[in-house]
Image (cartoon, coloured by chain):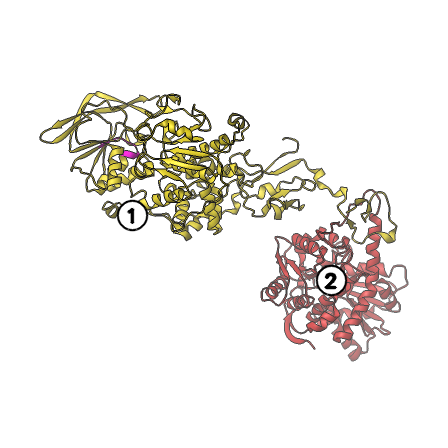
Chain colours: A yellow, B red
Amino acid sequence: MNKSKALGPDIQNLYTYSELPIGATAVGLPEGRETGLWRYMRPTIEEKIPPCQEACPAGNWIQRFVDATASGNLDEAWRALKLENPFPGVCGRVCYHPCEESCIRKEFDVSTFIHLIERSLADSFFNERLTPPIIRKKQDKKTAVVGSGPAGLACAYFLRVLGYEVTIFEARNELGGIPQTGIPAYRLPKEILNKEIGDIIALGIEVRKGCRIGKDMDFSELFTYDAIFLATGAHQTPPVNIPGVTNEGVYQGMDFLARYNMESSIDVGERVLVIGGGNVAIDVSRTLIRLGIQPTLLYRRTRSEMPAHSEEIDDALAEGARFQYLLSPFSIRKSEKTGLILECAKMKIQGVDPDGRPRAVPHEGKRVSFEADQVILAIGEVPDFSYLPKEIDLIKDLLWVNEWGQTSVEKVFAGGDMIDQPWNISEAIGSAKRAAIAMDHFLKGDDLQNLFRQGALAKTMREHLDLDLSPEPGHREVATFNDLNLSYVRSFSSQLSGKLPTVERICDFREVNSGLDLDAAIKEAGRCLSCGVCKMCGNCYLFCPDGAVQINPTTGRYAINYQYCKGCGICQNECPVGAITIEAEGAM
Amino acid sequence: MGTHKMLTGNYAAAYGAKLARVEVTPVYPITPQTHIMEKMAEFIENGELDAEFVSVESEHSALAVAIAAQATGARSFTATSAQGLLYMHENLFVASGLRLPIVMVLVNRALGAPNSIYPDLSDSLDQRDTGWIQVYVENAQEAHDMVVQAYRIAEDKRVLLPMAICFEGIIISHYMEPVEILDQEKVDNFLMPYLPEHVILDPDRPMSVGQIVMDDSYYMEYRYQQQEAMDRAKEVIQEVDEAFGQSFGRYYGGLLSTEMMEDAEVALLTLGSLASTARAVVNHLRNEDGISIGLVKLRMVRPFPDQELSELLSDTKVVVVLERDVSIGAGGIVYTELCRSLNGRNGPHLINYILGLGGRDVTFEDIKDIALLSCSERHTTTIDNPIRWYQVRGL
């Protein structure tokens, strides 16, 4: 459109009366109408990070899979979920869902039950063979993964998705690590775990079971691979300074669980003492209950200091476990008559430990003794580094890695419970993903140090593979409650998932927590507020008085036409998800 | 031949809009207009009318939507009353200034405060300066017919102005009368689709409408264009009335209609439903008492039939303006308009009766009393107190 030929009145008085267009029209868009010139506030479509995604150690694309679920697009939900996490069925059950702790909906009514949506999706796709969301074309590089726990399997999965050949080395004869050996079936049914492991292996991953590095194969042989990921976890019992721990009838918690979980049988007497306050102690206690034994759990601090998850402690108590607090094992003696005698020191809380937890100190040398057939010590495990070459540095009792998971040996990366991070499945998956992305750059010859400094090292697969179409991903703030316009939200909460009645669940290893059926999960997903992420609701488009919000034909997303935006801020005010910010023009 | 139905004025108007095949109807509810909106929604819902019903949050938005729709070339229809009309006020100027032939039904209702849902023509007469054509009708049939006529008048290339069809709330809007609903096929022949050439918003062909006119460049010229269009509307209104009569058999007289005005010494001039009562009075006084009296039913207030009235009333001795409205501090609005119309001529005495405000009943007897009193004044040289509030209680 040629502006100079535009019909219509202008100050040049070009028209005679008879030429004046009816309705004071002008063809084209003359400059006098560029109302953007009047603007002194500038709205920007600037998506934010939903706090759930910020909180997820595994880097799940939560908003995307929940939103897709809510709209009934389950295939897309499944792809978004699987892109970032090969273990949705496992995580939906055993991850302690920090996402829900940070869910903004909590401040409105009740958090969205993200873990139940994740679990429901996994369950509904249980009978389908996984098609990965994307598989990059074959890369001419070979990688090795040592250990097949969540970290090892996840890293193998991500490397495979990125096109690399992967070989997993596993010391045991079964894949799966702690979820396989340590998590009882009432929390994680074996078929769920093995289905997800099977889907990973089916991508074309070579598996060498029963191959313990350092025993069945020398570590140096791994160096024939182009990159190596170590994830051998923490399975070794630390030195325990209690006289009598070597007595028959004294077990280590993880060993006990592994023996039961792998062999489905174990001999125990009537009187079993469990020592410890972490998740392993609770898992041991609840396993014992299912074997018909009422265990007594002894812990050196009090309930509120127990590191175990609160819900699991409640479950254990409901199922009949007895807890005794402020007791620390002192010695274990063998007795001809009564089996074992465990002598404990009575403790009291006094002061604080360096890690900030209340400190337990001996209470005036008081002692108390218990008779027992078995004593199970669940007081922590440490990684085994004996197989590592000395070039791989340790720091304190853990493996040293840099910010992107690389050890002191260039081609060796590591993750999971070997490194300094919280020991749980989602942290393990997150560390594996971080390392897999770094390994991808490493194998392409990129300068990782430089990428890191530029902030160009992605933390998620969606960023790494450039699948997140949001405007300006990667430089976003985390959404807050005040960013949202909740006038558009109706308060409602879904039917909660239930638990098996206590009397039923202590008889066998049936799963205790029930999930949501798919319809309920879709409804629950509808509660997601999509914090900071545009859902294309169209409010900005509809409310803009100047028609200055338009759809960008390239991205299909909303964009603001600053030629006409007057900066009134209505779009920002009416955006339900807080994806629009406004600030004074020129303040950038 | 159309079908006959018992209809309220509101429904009759809605049927008219349906027959005109309107394409967009943004309407906001307000008594006594709401039935129109409801009927339009029903037509669209049950598939009788292929149109977009736009729910809006105010009358201001209703007209804004109608303006936008009409600017894209869609035939728009809306309706309102009283306070709702006042809320549209600024957009009335936009619609006429953009030369968009929107048709709107104005169901007259008294303006608050104090609140009333009964009629007073002041609400629409107040808006006579906004550049809209205004027609006042006296019954449901005329409302029905005029909605159809209005599109043809407004959309005529010589006119291109929005048009309002005004009738009294409750009295016409709510009471049922037998109405002939026009035949759709005949309406389609009478009324061509709206195919504008002046304002067509189309993303493929960007156009600015209602351009800013800086300094003193063209503002006056655009206003004069509107004046010319309003002047041309007079002949179009007459033509359309003629064409309508030929197609459907009913002639309304265009700008105004008369009853027994030949050699009448006294003329009653009124508008809306009062015309029906006044017509009965005129017929009675002529036929029973031989009084030389006639009726002028004013239909168009804009364009105001200045020329026509001054010719018609040149030999009349007394003109009595009966009206259900008032401009506080001046008199009846139609009366003041008529004074302007006859300015500078040695015309008739003008007497103004303000009556029926807020829906107060105006009976045959009331008008007959006024007519007889006026006849007695036809030989006086001057009229005392020409503006009279009829039967204000307790005075």
Q: CA distance from mark 2 to mark 1?
A: 69 Å
* Residue at mark 2 shares a chain with residue at mark 1: no
For badge 2, the amino acid type reads Tyr
Is residue A490 in view from this perspective?
A: no
Q: Is residue A518 left or right of residue A45?
A: left
Image location (x, y in percent) of residue A255: 25, 33
- Chain assignment, label 2: B
Say which element carries label 1.
loop
Image location (x, y in percent) of residue A345: 21, 24
Instruction: Identify the residue at horizontal 78%, vertical 59% (top origin).
Output: B160
Is residue A276 in the magenta section?
yes
Mark nearest the camera among 2 and 1 is 1
> Which label belongs to residue A500?
1
For badge 1, the amino acid type reads Leu
Circle 1 residues within 10 Å: few <14, some 14–19, many ≥20: few
Residue that extends furthest to the top in the rendered view of this protein:
A364
Image location (x, y in percent) of residue A328: 23, 26
Q: Are circles 2 and 1 on residues that touch, CB within 8 Å? A: no
Residue picked out by circle 2: B194
| Viewer-closest of A517 and B30 | A517
Q: Quadrant of residue B281?
A: bottom right
- Chain assignment, label 1: A
Q: Quadrant of residue B395?
A: bottom right
Q: Which residues are magenta?
A: A274-280
The N terminus of chain B lies in which quarter of the figure? Answer: bottom right
Query: Is B358 above or below relative to A304?
Result: below
